[in-house]
Image (tube, rainbow, N blue to C red):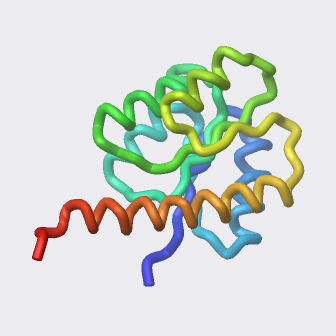
Amino acid sequence: MEETRILVVDDEPFIRTLLIDLVSDLDLQSDEAENGLAALELLKVKDYHVVLSDIKMPAMGGIELFENALKLNIFTPFIFLTGYSDDEMIIKALRLGAIDFLGKPFLPLELSNVIARTIELGQRRLELMKEIKSPQR
C-alpha cells in the first residue's frame, strides 16, 4: 500500500515543526519546504496526497504555488493556513480549488480532521480520474 505523504510549506520553522509533528502523530509521512519555490520543486518530483501551505511567504507564496502546480497539471489537494485575515486571498484560494482554509492559530484536532477528510477526497478524485481515463468496454 502506498504511503500517504503530506507536503508542509511554511516560512516559519516553528510552524513547520509543529505541522510535521502533527502529521507524524497521524502516522503520515511528510516533507517540508520553506517557501513556494522549494515546494514546487518537490511537487515536480514526488506525489503528495495533501499540501499544507501558508499563504504569505517570501520568494513564492501559497496561492502562487497552487497556481503554478495547476499549470503543471499537479492536482494535489491544498489546505491553506494563514495568520492573516484576507478575504480576497481566501476567495481566490477557494475559487482555484483549495480544499480548505484554516486560520493560525489552529486547533490540532481541527487540522487533523481536515487532513483526514482531504485525504479521502483526494483518493476519491484519483479513482474518478482513473475511471475517466480507462477505455470504455
Q: Residue furthest front?
A: 137
Give x and y (percent) for residue 103. 81, 35
Please tell me which residue is depicted at 77% across the width and 43% down the height of the picture: 15
Give x and y (percent) for residue 95. 53, 28
Question: Does 36 sit above or below residue 115?
Answer: above
Quarter of the figure with the N terminus: bottom left
Q: Is residue 92 left or right of residue 12?
A: left
Quarter residue 134 falls in: bottom left
Please tell me which residue is depicted at 77% across the width and 53% down the height of the picture: 111
Q: Is residue 119 visible?
A: yes
Give x and y (percent) for residue 42. 41, 47
Closer to the camera, 40 or 63? Answer: 63
Please tell me which residue is depicted at 66% across the width and 42% down the height of the picture: 100
Please tell me which residue is depicted at 85% across the width and 60% down the height of the picture: 109
Q: Residue furthest bottom?
A: 1
Quarter residue 90 falls in: top right
Q: Is residue 17 left or right of residue 128?
A: right
Give x and y (percent) for residue 17. 74, 51
Question: Does 87 sit above or below residue 5?
Answer: above
Q: Is residue 62 visible?
A: no
Q: Count up the numbered dots.
A: 0
Closer to the camera, 72 or 25? Answer: 72
Q: Is residue 73 left or right of residue 64?
A: left
